[in-house]
Image: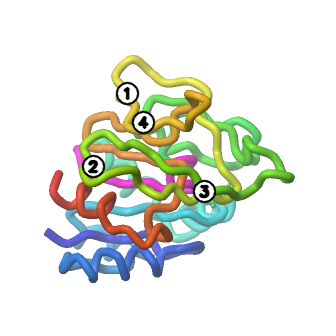
């Protein structure tokens, strides 16, 4: 199993480091030929509008849609969640939703005053106590489709991690948590 990490913009390096620390074979994905070598993919945090544009100029949109449609396991964190969603609110008009998970997400839902925070999270499938959730310019999940399972919520009840089939998304940054359990869990599901 080779795990690709989309490396067009944003925080891809900590994901590469987390996967390497767990002994997972991985590669940075910038071109369709890189994607063709990956058995699974991580879409990191960053700026979803920029990544969306770079996906188009790198001619990755169609190959990525095709791999998602044929069941490639994928983990999207923060901007990665926004990219994988079926509906994006407060996005840019030219932002293309990949539509891999049936949910509506609002960019920067927590506003500018409270752009970043940490929260201890109980995550379905993770043992060993709460997971340190690191939230940066947090997207808000505002609607979940019927087939989508919630994996973690804030104490307010707002969902911050979800899964549908082989697509897992989270609004926080597990790659910055100093805790490899979230990545470990993704790897063990492959
Ligand atoms: N607000 C960013 C976006 O719209 C996501 C923030 C992040 O990935 N930390 O893409």
Identify the mark nearer the N-term, 3 or 1.
Answer: 3
Q: Which residue is mark 2?
A: 126
Taking the image as drawn, is residue 64 in sight? yes
Q: Horizontally, is 53 left or right of 177 in the view?
A: right
Relative vertical location of residue 38 with respect to residue 115 in this rendering, above or below: below
Q: Which residue is mark 1?
A: 148
Residue for point 56% across, 60% down: 134
Look at discs 3 and 1 and give the one toward the viewer.
3
What is the CA distance from the residue labelled 1 to the residue labelled 2? 18 Å
Q: Residues within 10 Å of mark 3 (few under 14, many from 20)?
A: few
From the top left corner, tell me how far across and down residue 80 is, in percent. Answer: 51, 55
The answer to whether marks 4 and 1 mark residues whose Cβ atoms lie closer than 8 Å is yes
From the top left corner, tell me how far across and down residue 29 is, in percent. Answer: 39, 75
Q: Which residue is mark 4?
A: 101
Q: Residues within 10 Å of mark 2 (few under 14, many from 20)?
A: some
Look at discs 1 and 2 and give the one toward the viewer.
2
What is the CA distance from the residue labelled 4 to the residue labelled 1? 8 Å
Range of magenta residues: 70-82
Q: Which residue is mark 3?
A: 118
Look at discs 4 and 3 and give the one toward the viewer.
3
């Amino acid at each position: 199993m080779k795990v690709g990490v989309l490396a067009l913009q944003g925080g891809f390096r900590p994901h590469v480091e987390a996967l390497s620390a767990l002994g997972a074979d991985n590669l940075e994905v910038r071109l369709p030929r890189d994607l063709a070598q990956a058995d699974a993919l991580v879409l990191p945090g960053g700026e979803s509008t920029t990544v969306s544009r770079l996906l188009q100029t790198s001619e990755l949109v169609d190959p990525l849609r095709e791999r998602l449609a044929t069941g490639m396991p994928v983990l999207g964190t923060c901007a990665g969640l926004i990219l994988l969603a079926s509906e994006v609110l407060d996005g840019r008009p030219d932002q293309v939703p990949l539509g891999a998970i049936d949910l509506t997400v609002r960019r920067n839902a927590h506003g500018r005053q409270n752009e970043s925070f940490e929260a201890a999270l109980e995550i379905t499938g993770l043992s060993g106590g709460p997971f340190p959730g690191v939230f940066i310019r947090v997207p808000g999940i505002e609607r979940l489709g019927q087939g989508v399972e919630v994996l973690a919520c804030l104490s307010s009840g707002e969902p911050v991690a979800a899964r549908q089939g082989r697509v897992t998304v989270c609004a926080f940054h597990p790659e910055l948590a100093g805790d490899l359990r979230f990545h470990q869990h993704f790897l063990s599901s492959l």
